[in-house]
Amino acid sequence: MTGANSAMGVSRSAAFLTAGAMVEFALQFLLPVILVRQLDADTFGQYRFLTLMLGTALALAPAFMPQALYYFLPRAGGRQLTVIGNAAAWLACMGLVVAFLVSPVSPLAGELLGALHRATHGLSALYLGLSVLLTIVTTLAIAEGRILWHCSTELALALLRTALVATAAVLSHDIAWVVAALVLDATLRLAVLAAYLLTRPGGARLRCEPASLLAQLRYALPFAAGGSLFAMRAQADGWIAASAMPPQVFDAFTIGAV
């Protein structure tokens, strides 16, 4: 972290990041508590299956490329736009892969996945693909030292996401509208990412270079392997339940887990 972050001070930056993370965690905990009271058992089970897929996608697909920006950006010199562009290109490609894998044409498609795709009119695949791309948002501003930008935008978006999803659930009691609210939140996050790139020092003309992309991947993959194994250990029980139980029993399992 350089520039603005150096002027702010490490302790103050850490305090801002910690406070923002605590508020966002509280909102993430609150949202399922609201939804379980507004959606029926089957619908809430679909929502929990969506969050299970999201957790798995975010554990595997980004391959630690967003976090690798902490290492590469301070060392990039005049090639920062290439480093950012490489990470964004990787995440965009992996977002497309995830969107395909959770669609009905995927060889991995099962009963729960097909039911969720039909119930959301395909928005679940769009949301998961966008979520992979948007993992860069969680690290880019911090890696470039724009701590206040990160904390303020993340807090505002977390509050807005909670309000959008809760309102959709209260008014519709329908998973399609809940996922539509999540897609709207992802679209707003894309707009914030675009605004960030347009306002950052040095401009926003991202470039992708295969050779340097491979160098970033070589650095990131060992960390990605360790992080993915740790995350999948926590999610294994959910996938066992989803694969071994009928949909209505999985619904009850997810409600009990909350």
Image (cartoon, rainbow, N blue to C red):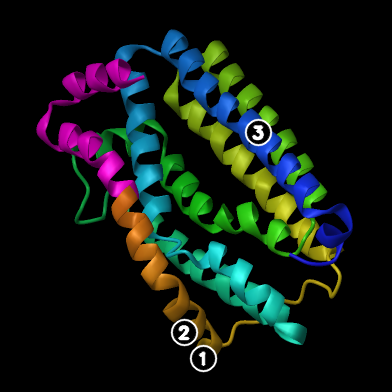
Q: Few, some or many C-alpha atoms within 10 Å of disc 2 (few <14, some 14-19, many ≥20)?
A: few
User: Does the magenta segment cover residue 244?
Assistant: yes
Res. 23 in view: yes
Quadrant location of the C terminus?
A: top left
Question: What separation in Å lies between label 2 and label 1 (alpha carbons)?
Answer: 5 Å
Whether residues under marks 2 and 1 lie with C-beta atoms below 8 angstroms apart, the answer is: yes
- Viewed as shown, does residue 73 lie left or right of 10? left
Quick one: SS at disc 2?
helix
Q: Which residues are magenta?
A: 231-258
Question: What separation in Å lies between label 1 and label 3 (alpha carbons)?
Answer: 36 Å
Q: Few, some or many C-alpha atoms within 10 Å of disc 1 (few <14, some 14-19, many ≥20)?
A: few
In the picture, residue 137 is in which quadrant? bottom right
Q: Residue 214 got which mark? A: 2
Q: Nearer the viewer, residue 244 or 83?
A: 83
The residue at the point 45 percent across, 47 percent down is 128
Q: Which residue is mark 3?
A: 158
Q: Which amino acid type corresponds to the residue marked 2 in the rendered image?
A: Leu
Q: Residue 211 got which mark? A: 1
Give the dominant element type of the magenta stretch: helix, strand or loop. Answer: helix
Residue 98 at x, y percent in the picture: 38, 56
- Viewed as shown, does residue 151 lie left or right of 131? right
- Viewed as shown, does residue 248 lie left or right of 206? left
The residue at the point 46 percent across, 28 percent down is 176
Q: How many marks?
A: 3
